[in-house]
Structures are given as structure tokens and as C-alpha cells.
């Protein structure tokens, strides 16, 4: 009996892309594992170790134990601590954490064809975007930071918020607010999108629907803030003052705005400026944190940074402009071909946004708001490539749309593989979505 031929649909493509993306990222130089056990590098990792060893959310700095902290957001350290508790601190745990972070990124890339299909572009732009994302990895994938988890959360919540039926009832609004609350506790900057996205969606609705959906949006936002308030209460009980999730703004601003500051974290470190100012590298500064208390230290650093910014406005504006450029067109050390690829993705995202706006203005508004609001704080502190990764998929998606459109115009139909010709229809088949 002849075998039934396999019909490739969207689900198969996404699964295949996940496997390929995972493999390509795992082989990438940026994902090379160093050491044979969980490292002490990264504030979130050290807080996770403190949770396991002492049961305290404390000691984020390498040079000295400085006590209870609000330097990092809580979700990733607690996840990391749970893995340390289950698997120890040896190489198996390091490998598991490394694999989970690669998976967070690979899932984002694998879901891009599904998302472009939902938006009406078909699979091709998503496949192109996924391939671009896999070969353009330009930050370390060692599990020390939460950027890949945040990117995964943001992609999920972007789709859920964009599809208004996902929060069209009170129950659904409550559930979506719960997810938003976890995201804000993973990266507090997401509170800007929590406030902006529902507002823009409600404002674009017909007048007769706005009141009901405004109430749902308010329920969603209040639920999220209720979740976030649990950590705000913890911080207030610990430090005796209000802070929104974390208190590291003063330190980060002072590192990035002083006489020896540079545009990027690497340049700041190379110039010796990081050693002079950061408790991770200077035991004298770490002792100041321990002696003054973290909150007083952070407030003193905030005051110092604001004074310097006010008194050196030309230097401050120059640094801000350089960091703006670094966020969108980052310097990728030692791999210039990859740097130019990342720049190409940023450039192609602009015409891709026009295509996205024409196809689905509601979704395009959410992406555009993420471009405007998310990077704002990162223009003020030394730039690192990992800061881009929570919204990197929002650049890959329109870049893939733009490149697919250009390819469709420049290539004769007979040279395009059948699966691509079929998937790049403006309207897709229903079975491809399911």
C-alpha cells in the first residue's frame, strides 16, 4: 500500500523552525558555555544563589555581601533559584539553564511564521524573519540575564492583547492582567506598554464599544498592578520607602553619566570607569552600599547623576545620541558581517512597518509603541546588546515582511519554492492557521 504523502502545514513549519533555530543558536559563538558550574556573574544569578543558600533576596554584587536588595526584578531570580534547588550548581544545572534560555529565543523565532500568517502575510515573511534571527545572535546566551524570557513573554502578551476577544470579558481581562503582572515583575519597563497598548486599542474602537472595553482594560491594568503591588509592598517593608519593583536606576544612571562614561558598557569597562563606580568591581563602592544601605546609596547616586547631567548638558546629549545609535545599530565586536546583518534588519524593519500598518494597523500600533517606549531608559545608561532582545522579534517580523515583498517582486514565480509561493498569499488557507 503506497504511503500517504505528508502535507506540510503551518504547525509543521513552526516545529521544524524551532528545532533548527535551537541548533543554530546553540552552535553560535555567543552561546558558548564557559565553565563547569553555575557562575557567580550577573546580579540575578547571585540573588538566586542567595535565595538557595540563605533564603534571602539579597547580595547582588560580586565584591561583598550587601544585604537585602531590590536591585533586580524578582521573577527571573526566583525561577533560577528553583532550578538551582532542583539540580544543584554543577554542570547539569548550567546546561539546563542554558538550554531553557536558548529555547525561549528559539520559540520566538519559531512562532514568527505563525504570527505573520495570522496577520495575513502567509508563512514566508515569518520564515525569513526566523532565519535572520537565528544567524544574527549578537548577545550572550548563557542564562545570566532575563532578556530572552522577557522577549518570549512579550510576544505572547502582544498577541493576547492585540486580539481583543482575549480580554472582552471580565474573566479574560483578569487572566490577561495576571500575565501582564508577571511580565512587569520580570522587567518593570513593561509597565509603559501595559498602560499604552490597551489605551491605543480602546481608542481605535467604534464609539459604541469603547465604554465596555475601557472597563475591561481598566480591570486588566488593575489586576496587573495588584500582582505588581505584592513586590512593591515587600520593598516598602524591607527598605521603608516606595519604589517601583527595583531601585537600581540611580546606580545605572551614575555609571552612564559621569566624566569618564562612554556610550557602551564594554567601553565604560575598558576605560576603567566601571571599576571606579560600580560595586561589582570595586570593594570600596560595595562597602558603601553595605554601610549606607542600598536605598540611601541608590538615592545618592541618582542625585549625583542628575547633577552631572544638568551641569554637562552637551556631554549628556552626546552620550544619549550615541546610545540611541547603539540600541538600533549596535556595535558587534569581532564579527563585522554579523553587525551589518543586524543593521540591515533594523533598516528593513522601517519599510516592513509600512507594510504591516497597511495590512493590520492595530498590530502595527503595538509594535510601533514598543519601539518608542521600551528603549527610552536604555538611551540614558551604558548600552548592551542584550537590552534589545525583549523587542528584537518586533524588528525581525517587519524586516521579514519587507524582504519577502522585495523577493516576490524581484523573483520570477517559477524560481520560488512551492511552499513559499503558497504561503505568501495575502489571504491564507484556514487549515494553515489551525
Image (cartoon, rainbow, N blue to C red):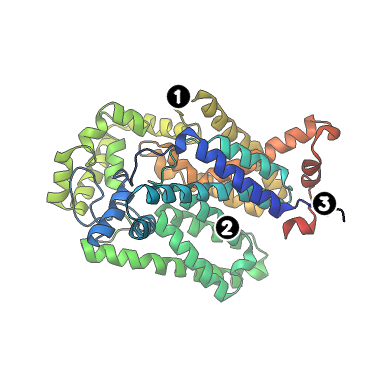
Q: Position of residue 348 (x, y in %)?
A: 63, 34
Query: Label 2's element?
Result: helix
- From what the image shows, is residue 185 above or below residue 102? below
245 on left or right of 386: left
Query: Label 1's element?
Result: loop
**Number of on-image labels:** 3
- For this orientation, the residue located farthest to the front is 1
Which is nearer the N-term, disc 3 or disc 1?
3
Of residues 147 and 168, the one nearer the viewer is: 147
Q: Residue at x 39, y 34 (%)?
A: 320
Q: Residue at x 87, y 56 (%)?
A: 1
Q: Look at the image and tell me whether residue 410 can be seen.
A: yes
Q: Residue at x 56, y 68 (%)?
A: 214
In the rendered image, which residue does mark 2 sit on? 200
149 on left or right of 8: left
Of residues 346 and 207, the one nearer the viewer is: 346
Q: Is the residue under label 3 in contact with that under label 2 (CB below 8 Å)?
A: no
Q: Nearer the viewer, mark 2 or mark 3?
A: 3
In the rendered image, which residue does mark 3 sit on? 5
- From what the image shows, is residue 270 above or below residue 294? above
Which is nearer the N-term, disc 2 or disc 3?
3
Q: Nearer the viewer, mark 2 or mark 1?
A: 1
227 on left or right of 9: left
Q: Residues within 10 Å of mark 3 (few under 14, many from 20)?
A: few
Which is nearer the N-term, disc 2 or disc 1?
2
Query: Label 3's element?
Result: loop
Gap in angstroms between the C-alphas marked 2 and 1:
41 Å
In the rendered image, which residue does mark 1 sit on? 334
Amino acid at each position: 500500500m503506497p504511503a500517504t504523502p505528508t502535507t506540510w502545514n503551518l504547525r509543521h513549519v513552526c516545529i521544524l523552525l524551532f528545532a533548527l533555530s535551537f541548533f543554530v543558536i546553540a552552535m553560535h559563538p555567543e552561546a558558548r558555555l564557559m565553565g563547569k558550574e553555575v557562575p557567580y556573574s550577573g546580579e540575578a544569578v547571585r540573588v538566586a544563589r542567595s535565595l538557595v543558600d540563605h533564603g534571602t533576596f539579597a547580595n547582588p554584587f560580586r565584591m561583598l555581601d550587601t544585604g537585602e536588595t531590590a536591585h533586580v526584578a524578582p521573577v527571573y531570580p526566583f525561577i533560577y533559584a528553583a532550578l538551582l534547588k532542583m539540580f544543584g550548581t554543577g554542570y547539569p544545572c548550567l546546561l539546563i539553564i542554558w538550554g531553557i534560555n536558548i529555547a525561549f529565543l528559539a520559540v520566538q523565532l519559531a512562532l514568527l511564521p505563525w504570527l505573520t500568517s495570522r496577520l495575513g502575510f502567509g508563512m514566508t515573511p515569518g520564515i525569513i524573519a526566523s532565519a535572520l534571527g537565528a544567524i544574527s545572535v549578537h548577545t550572550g546566551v548563557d542564562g545570566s540575564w532575563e532578556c530572552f524570557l522577557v522577549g518570549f513573554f512579550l510576544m505572547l502578551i502582544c498577541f493576547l492583547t492585540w486580539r481583543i476577544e482575549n480580554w472582552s470579558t471580565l474573566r479574560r481581562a483578569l487572566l490577561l492582567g495576571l500575565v501582564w503582572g508577571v511580565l512587569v515583575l520580570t522587567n518593570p519597563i513593561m509597565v509603559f506598554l501595559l498602560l499604552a497598548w490597551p489605551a491605543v486599542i480602546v481608542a481605535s474602537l467604534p464609539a459604541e464599544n469603547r465604554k465596555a472595553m475601557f472597563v475591561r482594560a481598566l480591570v486588566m491594568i488593575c489586576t496587573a498592578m495588584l500582582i505588581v503591588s505584592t513586590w512593591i509592598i515587600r520593598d516598602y517593608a524591607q527598605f521603608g520607602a516606595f519604589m517601583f519593583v527595583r531601585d537600581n536606576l540611580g546606580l545605572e544612571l551614575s555609571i552612564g553619566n559621569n566624566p569618564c562614561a562612554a556610550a557602551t558598557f564594554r567601553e565604560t569597562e575598558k576605560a576603567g570607569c566601571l571599576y571606579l563606580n560600580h560595586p561589582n568591581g570595586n570593594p570600596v563602592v560595595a562597602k558603601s552600599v553595605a554601610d549606607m544601605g542600598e536605598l540611601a546609596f541608590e538615592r545618592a547616586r541618582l542625585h549625583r547623576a542628575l547633577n552631572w547631567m544638568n551641569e554637562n548638558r552637551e556631554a549628556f546629549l552626546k552620550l544619549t545620541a550615541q546610545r540611541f545609535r547603539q540600541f538600533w545599530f549596535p556595535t558587534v565586536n569581532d564579527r563585522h558581517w554579523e553587525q551589518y546583518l543586524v543593521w540591515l534588519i533594523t533598516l528593513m524593519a522601517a519599510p516592513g512597518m509600512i507594510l504591516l500598518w497597511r495590512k493590520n494597523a492595530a498590530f502595527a500600533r503595538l509594535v510601533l509603541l514598543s519601539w518608542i517606549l521600551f528603549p527610552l531608559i536604555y538611551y540614558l545608561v551604558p548600552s548592551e546588546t542584550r537590552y534589545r532582545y525583549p523587542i528584537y522579534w518586533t524588528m525581525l517580523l517587519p524586516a521579514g515582511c519587507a524582504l519577502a515583498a522585495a523577493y516576490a517582486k524581484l523573483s520570477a514565480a517559477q524560481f520560488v519554492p512551492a511552499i513559499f509561493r503558497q504561503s505568501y498569499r495575502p489571504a491564507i488557507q484556514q487549515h494553515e492557521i489551525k
